[in-house]
Image (cartoon, grey):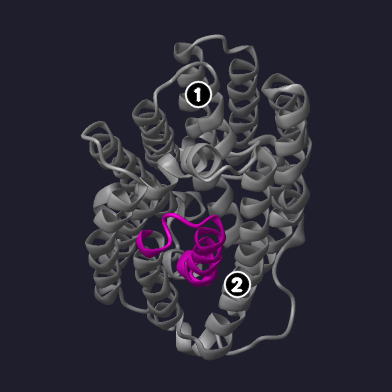
Amino acid sequence: MSFRDIPRTVWAIALGGALLDASIGMILAIWPVHLTENLGASAFTVGLIEGVGDAITAAMTLLGGYLADRFARRRRIILIGEGIGALMRFGYALGASSLALLAAVRFADRFGRSAIGAPRNALVGEVQAGAPGGGAVGYGALYGVIAIGAGIGPLIASAIVAAGGDFAMVAWATVPIGLLGWGCYWFAREARGVEQVAITTTGPLGDWRLMGPIVALGCLMNVAAVGWAFLLLRGRSVGMAEENVALLFALLCLAQGASGLIGGRFAAWIGARNGLMLAGFAMATANALCALAGDASTVVAGVLVWGAAWGLFNAIGTGVMFAAAAPNRRAFAFGLISLIHTLPMFASGPLYGKLIDQVGAPPAFWTGAGFALVLAIVARFTIPSAWR
């Protein structure tokens, strides 16, 4: 399957997600620096906010998946969730000077946007049903375009900050971008036949010979990644200016997007097992670079490899998940697996933050490297070699 064969609905969802992620990327590029340097938050507080956000994400992903299967309306759930996310762009601007308000807005943003993950993944798989590679080409395009959008956002934020702007100014600039992204979702359409197969909410979730390993690998990857906020703080710790930290986030997202596009396009040739092993080794390398970093160039290299590892993992892993899930329970299966993937992060985010506060960044990143190597080993012995 080539990019030309990807249905229009996938491109509409990808473009909408890219614009919304560009808007949140503008915020997140300066988020940890704004919280720690302007509002006085500790690294532990930053990790705690993201940990609670991850909990909200997990719960809403599960609920969104259940509702999408129960009512056979993937698109409607996506429109509601992304609509809430678009409105929260106003919240970031209005609450820019308050840590409590920003935390509340962050939670509300993730409440809305997290509900769309499972139905979006199910819809993208369904509209390209029967594609080789478990639909990894479409998933690679989806995650790739979205990540590229998320990378463009920090470039805009960096330009605003370099021109003398502050967090509030960046936040106000996200409002029209978020609303435009929400509008793109109106051009998506339900897959044919979903109404007939997606009305059952009981029965097996799918083939656990594949789903089981993906559950384990996703948990390991989320812990191994340490956290994007800590990557940005690592850049700040080696002397990067605030606008350059925003550029660092852009590089991370662009690397993730390019890797997703390439990994999805060649997923059938790479093979699921080899691709997931490669993602594990890449994440271990990224963490090692961040642990050893004494200057900005090493952090930049670590961030690029980090993004590439995630892009490859998302494209191939999501394709395997779709192929393994039962047709009548796909959205709920995505939601449940995402919930399980998120559970370790409830503890890992705050613990990594505490570790960085008390003994510094290198031990935290070496710990992440260890988990990444375990991921590569698990993929080697659990994913069938013939799976394409």
Vertical position of residue 346 compared to residue 7: above or below: above
Q: Which residue is mark 2?
A: 60
Residue type beneath disc 2: Met
Main secondary structure type of the part rendered in magenta: helix
Residue type beneath disc 1: Gly
- Name which residue lies at 72% across and 31% down: 357
Q: Which residues are magenta?
A: 93-121
The one of 183 and 359 positioned closer to us in this rendering? 359
- Name which residue lies at 38% across and 34% down: 246
Q: In this image, 188 relative to 384: left or right?
A: left
Vertical position of residue 243 compared to residue 199: above or below: above
The answer to which image quadrant residue 156 occupies is: top left
Q: Position of residue 388 (x, y in %)?
A: 55, 44
Q: Which residue is mark 1?
A: 235
- Name which residue lies at 77% across and 40% down: 351
Q: In this image, 145 relative to 105: left or right?
A: left
